[in-house]
Image (tube, helix red, strand yellow):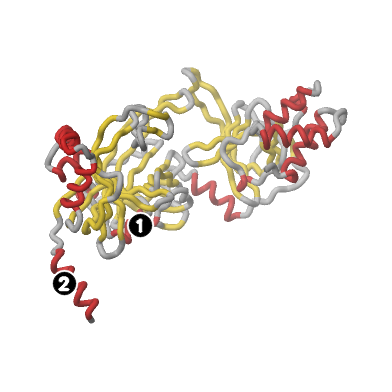
Amino acid sequence: MVNQDELAPHVADITRALKGTVDEGEVRRLLSNYVGTYKIPLADAKRTIVKHFGGDPTGLAAGVRKRIADLQGGEQSVDLVVKVLSVAPKIVTVRGSERTIMEGYFGDPSGVVRFTSWTATVPFEVHDSIIVANAYTKEFRGEVQLNLGERVRIAPSGEIIEVPAEVASRVGRSSAPTGSSAHGGKPLTVSQLREGARDFSITVRIGSVTERLVEVEGVTKTVYGGVCGDATGRLEFTSWHDHHLQPGDVVTIGGGYVRGWRGIPQLNFDERASVTKAAEGAPSNLPSVSELGAPQRLTVAQVEERGGAQGVAVEGIVVDVRPGSGLIARCPDCNRVLQNQECRTHGRKKGTIDLRVKAVLDDGTGALSVVFNRALTERILERDLQACAEMAEARGDERVIDEELRSRLVARPLVVIGNVMSDDYGAMLIASELQESAIDVPAQARAMLEDLEA
């Protein structure tokens, strides 16, 4: 349902553009119908209504004034009243041609935002208080940025905008040059990083660095990725700028941000980040490069607290093999598991046969869902997919494979290695390797009985 209070300023905007020739109630009805019923984007709905009544859509204002802290990516038309904190020219290459643009930061009492003006001149200077109308936003590398395009309107503000020092200081933190000691933000460890984290600094050892080419807005860029970590864990990083990182470097990074996929955090930073290398030979309790390449031992409780992690090893006892294990059929188009020969996206399909295990691993601190792929399932069963399919066909029942998995896995102690993901259903370890565990199950059972008797 459409919030009529939120529509009110847009109704007034349309009415002004139509010079009062259409009843405001009719405008409200049409706008509510377009946005609420037909799900037409607000800006498009406004232009459509004005055109419908023979008006000029260019007379539409940007809409409701917003605070910087309330900006979201993908907004097509926003108004702000801000103070100019910085502005400078920048030469960029767009589709093979050099172009001069202007970049900088705006601020208001709620926050700061980076802006890009796609013209070489701007009608304002540092410290000016201005009205910015009809700008648009994009999200870039996890950050909302303001864009001043051809339709933007800039005017002096009748009010003086004051930006608190603690808010304005974020510009300095996020744009500190390479090698700066002004890291800013709260020091965190790898285990404390969560998706969306900003305004922090972190000290890690670089375990590996690779380069790859990506295309951003028609421009090919080199990005640098790899693995880094500290005593609490490891994670992947992506640097959108060449900070000349090498395996073995100990660096303190400020001005980065954390993105994630299904609970697995990834550290991102660019040319605005502060990246300071420790002096050679400086003492450190950080893991070595070889240690960063080995799986990190965690308990189930630690895994669940983090929500997601890469390259972990969890030791425990398999206490259950869940339905959906054994022989399964996957959609040939999207690889999803079919249910009664139906894919939830592509409908009825002739599936591709596969093997997997969905198990539960318990280490005394908690229970964790674990998924073994085809290769690991074949190792557990000591027969390949073809042999499993033939066995099921001979018995006339695919559940024979599921039953054998239960007999081989339940009560078996294992060390499972892989990545931990999380969603609305909790944490799940996607196994890449498994090893036999040295856990003495009978001894643990006797100890448990003694505890119960006591």
Q: Vertical placement of 223 versus 234: above or below?
A: above
- Residue where numbered disc 1 is placed: 304
Q: Residue at x 33, y 44 (%)?
A: 236
The kind of residue on which mark 2 rests is Arg
* Residue 384 image position (x, y, % from top left): 15, 36
Please, what is the three-letter code of the amino acid marked with disc 1? Glu
Image: 381 above or below 29: below
Residue at the image position 77 percent from the left and 26 percent from the top = 50
Quadrant location, the N terminus? top right
Mark 1: which secondary structure?
helix
Name the residue carrying label 2.
446
Tell me where residue 198 appears, x and y as whole percent: 47, 50
Q: Which of marks 2 and 1 is in front?
A: 2
The answer, for residue 280, to whether it is visible in the render is yes
- Who's the residue at 70% across and 32% down the image? 34
Within the image, what quadrant is residue 221 found in?
A: top left
- Measured along the vertical axis of the image, is residue 187 above or below residue 379? below
Q: What is the crowding at mark 1: few (fewer than 14 residues within 10 Å), some, or many (at least 20)?
A: some
- Given residues 210 and 87, the one toward you in this image is 210
Asked whether residue 207 appears in the rendered view, the answer is no
Q: In this view, does 392 lie to the left or right of 267?
A: left
Q: Outermost residue toward the front?
A: 396
Q: Which of 259 and 22 is in front in this view?
A: 22
Report, in whole angstroms, how far the alpha carbon at label 2 lies from the one at label 1.
28 Å
Earlier along the polypeptide chain: callout 2 or callout 1?
A: 1
> Tag count in the figure?
2
Provide the secondary structure element on which disc 2 rests: helix
Screen quadrant of the C terminus: bottom left
Horizontal and vertical percent for residue 118? Answer: 59, 27
Q: Where is residue 430 in the image (x, y as percent from the top left)?
A: 29, 46
123 displayed left or right of 411: right
